[in-house]
Image (cartoon, helix red, strand yellow):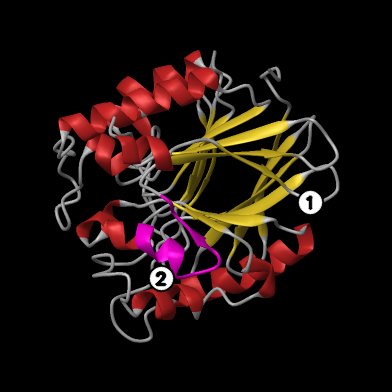
Amino acid sequence: MDYLLRLFATLTICYLVKGDDRINFVMVGDWGGQPEAPYYTPAQKEVASQMGRKATEINSMFTIALGDNFYDTGVKDVDDPRFQKTFEDVFTAKSLYSRWYVIAGNHDHYGNASAEIAYTAHSHRWYMPNYYYTETMTIPGTHTDIQFVFIDTVILAGLSHPTKRWLPLHGPESINAAEDQWEWIEETLKASTAKWLFVLGHYPVWSVAEHGPTDTLVQRLRPLLNQYNVTAYFCGHDHNSQHIHEANSDVEYFVTGAAHKIQTSVENADKIPSDSLLFYYGVESESYGAFSYVSITPTEMTVGYIDEKGNELYTYQKAPTRKSG
């Protein structure tokens, strides 16, 4: 791994002062609007509004964006007006003006994904220091750490075809770049002493929907998640909401990819472990959307899904399975 990747991927410790012995945040995936005016979809606009309300309600400390930030072909450069029209002008609630932790999706890689890294220096809330990076936070008033490992699944598994979605991923563009990231992922997970450990990427490991499981991630990431007792894997890519939990594993799999529009698909239901789908929400409409929120204390994690009208679709609680280092 080259020097710059190691520099930007260095662990950052953040001691947060907000909250009451808990860390709360909201999460959104596949939220990237549209390439023509008004540069957002009805679902995205409604989701942004409800995210602001929920973020206020739970005193959200930050937002996580799981990729496909700009449809259809990402951005051209750091001065692309889409940053303003699809992001800054849409997510306007004061409660969403804290840091946004961002990763790239396949649609971002169709354009200039490096410009999204560069935009970190142009926005006080957009934070994407590299294609992959990690952050560790301490729950206020406690000694309990939470570690987030943000990865770039396009570098790992390859870029999907822009129109022929049924085609399998062709594999990484650069084997060396992929192997560098795999090495970094394992080193980071192995070194973690956090009580709560999350991995976040764009492509799913498991999914019942249109894109289905990502073979490379099933074969190479899933064993690492199990080996290093990762709490949960969060992703987007499929435009719906899912919670999957396979037997004999402590890892939770959450799909949050419905902020741009929702699609109905369960065509890959037979490709995930039997009886592992705990929650699914999908409707065929560009006027419906969803996002998620997470609340973490030293003794419990809560993950909830909210639709574009503010309705609570699903809530899940989990006790920690990791010991602090």
| Residue at 32% from the left image edge and 22% from the top image edge | 220
- Residue 126 visible, this orientation: yes
On the rendered structure, is 28 left or right of 132?
right
Give the x, y percent position of residue 30: 41, 58
Reply above or below: 248 against 23.
Answer: above
- Residue 273 visible, this orientation: no
| Front in this rendered view, residue 99 or 241 | 99
Q: Earlier in the sequence, mark 1 or mark 2?
A: 1
Reply above or below: 202 against 245.
Answer: below
Reply above or below: 242 against 310.
Answer: above
| Front in this rendered view, residue 105 or 287 | 105
Q: Amino acid at mark 2?
A: Glu
Q: Quadrant of the C terminus?
A: top right
Are the residues flagged by discs 1 and 2 in contact, CB closer than 8 Å?
no
Q: Amino acid at mark 1?
A: Val
Secondary structure at numbered mark 2 = loop
Query: Pointer 2: what residue?
Result: 286
The magenta stretch is 117-129
Query: Pointer 1: what residue?
Result: 17
Secondary structure at numbered mark 1 = loop
| Residue at 76% from the left image edge and 39% from the top image edge | 139
**Which of the labelled discs sits on residue 223, or is there none?**
none
Give the x, y percent position of residue 142: 83, 34
Q: Quadrant of the N terminus?
A: top left
| Front in this rendered view, residue 277 or 14 | 14
| Residue at 46% from the left image edge and 58% from the top image edge | 258
| Residue at 55% from the left image edge and 34% from the top image edge | 198
Q: Is residue 110 magenta?
A: no
